[in-house]
Amino acid sequence: MLEKIYSYIESSTATLVELETELCKRPALSPDSGGVGELDKVEFLQSWLKAHGITQLERHDAPDSRAKGGVRP
């Protein structure tokens, strides 16, 4: 079983590097640190996951009027 996991990880390296590159393009700083929150990063990640077949997602937002969209996902 462990070999299957390692094999999957190795075959997915390019995809995971692409994902991490895209995530790093989207800052996710809290309003306390001068940012607008995590909304852009979360919306991108939701879209990416759905495009890759992961469609059952559950998001729990916390209200925060200082953040973009008024929430902190």
Image (tube, grey):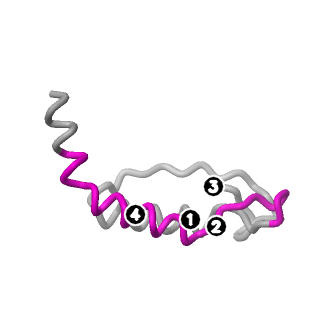
> Mark 1 is on which residue type?
Lys
> Mark 4 is on which residue type?
Leu
Q: Which label number is shown at residue 19?
A: 4
The Cα–Cα distance between marks 1 and 2, rounded to whole angstroms, is 7 Å
Q: Which label number is shown at residue 41?
A: 1
Residue placed at 56% from the left, 65% from the top?
41
Q: Pick whichever of labels 3 and 1 is earlier in the sequence.
A: 1
Mark 2 secondary-structure assignment:
loop
Residue 50 position in % (x across, y down)? 34, 62
Q: Which label number is shown at residue 64?
A: none
| Residue identified by numbered label 2 | 27
Residues in magenta, as a range: 8-34
Q: Pick whichever of labels 1 and 2 is earlier in the sequence.
A: 2
Q: Pick whichever of labels 1 and 4 is earlier in the sequence.
A: 4
Q: Pick whichever of labels 3 and 2 is earlier in the sequence.
A: 2
Q: Are marks 1 and 2 in contact (CB under 8 Å)?
A: yes
Residue 18 position in % (x across, y down)? 37, 67
Numbered disc in front, either 3 or 1 = 1
Q: Residues within 10 Å of mark 1 (few under 14, many from 20)?
A: some
